[in-house]
Amino acid sequence: MQTIKCVVVGDGAVGKTCLLISYTTNKFPSQEDYDRLRPLSYPQTDVFLVCFSVTSPASFENVKEKWMPEVHHHCPGVPCLIVGTQVDLRDEPTVTEKLARQKQRPITAEQGEKLAREMGAVKYVECSALTQRGLKNVFDEAIVSALEPPQLKRGPDDRNQEATVYLGNLDERVTDAIVWELMLQAGPVVNVHLPKDRVSMSHQGYGFCEFLTEDDAEYACKIMNQIKLWGKPIRVNKASSDKKQLDVGANLFIGNLDENVDERLLYDTFSAFGIMATTAKIARDPTSGVSKGYGFVSYTDFESSDGAIESMNGQFLMNKAITVQYAFKKDGKGERHGTPAERLLAAQARKNNALPVGTRPGYGYQGQFAGVFAQPPPPAGFGSNPAPIPGSVPSTPQGAGGMPPPPPPPPPTSSGVPVYNGTAGYMPPPPPPPPTGFAPPPGMLPGMPPPSGMMPPPPMGMMPPGMMPPPPPPPGFPPMGR
């Protein structure tokens, strides 16, 4: 006769033991029945029943966060049923009132079915060990699932690519279990796969780790990238197959590095300027592993690489002034990256939405407030920003984030002496006010000739506005103040 091994897992006090004893003895268990059960183990299991109590939202969350990932790890491909227990208490007033005080509600069947779909379980079923409601159906479904298991694949095409990270530069001593335990620090792990050589059965230095959610994978990339296992910095980044990396050419050479600068420190230092296209690399001696004193970083946009050069070239890192410049092209015959042609291609790729992973227009060295290739220029007269030509209009407003260029030289007055106005820079003085009791001539603006038939303003003096003596009255009028 064929036998089927069934293992029941779940939080404590959710009714796992009651479920088993009630089914096997056809009665609700007493306290002494618990002592007759022996511990159950995972090996050679045909089907799993992952249980939670419908009156315990915490146990429901643990199905997603703990039990299903653990089962998938130890027994990948084994069918699982999610079982909601204690359904007889779902409508119990004392239970609902207790949950209401905690701002919670009993778990509904709809919530259980949704969880089963999300976790890839065969089915969601629920029962009551006390009333035996749905109890037989639970084990009937388990038997069917064990005898006719669904075809569950865990190949690359079925893996959740958005929740999967790539692991590179792994030491030969790294195992699946080590990767599992390490990545659990970032979030619940669904699966770990290290491709192995068919002859030696050792992994090939890389692998994949699938997390429960995309957020967990993103978090793992942030905290696990470049950490060291057996002295080797591992590479951790997203393994999305539908996203293609685009090498825009924003590759930098960092020279004069201290021998104590490692890949992690280099990555942390330069990732502050933008999104890194690859992990930081340090040239090392292949035998001793000692740094050769230089390394490379690559960005997903030129705004970030330009900002890194501007800010870090000549700065001290580990007590040594480093040099930061664009790296030489591999096949460029002495030509460096960052050429106008590369920048033009990168700009065209943006227009065609062929952006590198994680790049968005305006998210570079200046952050979310910058535009595409729109860093504010340095102050006038510094670097590549020359002083403005006399009479030209400043190209950068003061509110744009940069310093406004100095005003043009003052135009001379009729006497050859410039007049200064504190708010507008050097400018010609305005005409003197009209005589007392007369309104200003309509349409008369500074620098414009007076309308025909009107007297021109008196000549301007050499003193700034507000310190000039009163002008003489027009002919035919008595002097002012008499």
Image: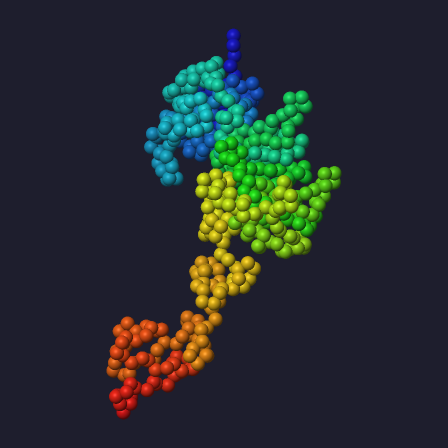
- Residue 6 placed where, x, y %? 50, 18
Residue 234 lies, in percent from the top left, at 62, 37
Furthest residue toward front? 452
Q: Quadrant of the C terminus?
A: bottom left
Please state which of residues 459 and 292 is positioned toward the viewer in this rendering: 459
Q: Can the viewer see residue 342?
A: yes
146 and 388: which is toward the camera: 388
Residue at image location 49% in from the left, 21% down from the top: 152
Residue at 57% over, 54% down: 310
Indicate whether 162 appears above or below 405.
above
Please give left or right for residue 231 compared with residue 8 in the image: right
- Relative placement, left or right, of 444 versus 310 is left
Judge whether residue 265 can be spotted in this image.
no
Residue 441 location, quadrant: bottom left
Q: Position of residue 392 (x, y in %)?
A: 45, 64
369 in relation to 122, above or below: below
Residue at (65% x, 37% y) in the render: 229
x and y percentages locating residue 313 in the rendered image: 61, 54
In this view, 396 is above or below 293: below
Q: Residue at x 51, y 14 (%)?
A: 4
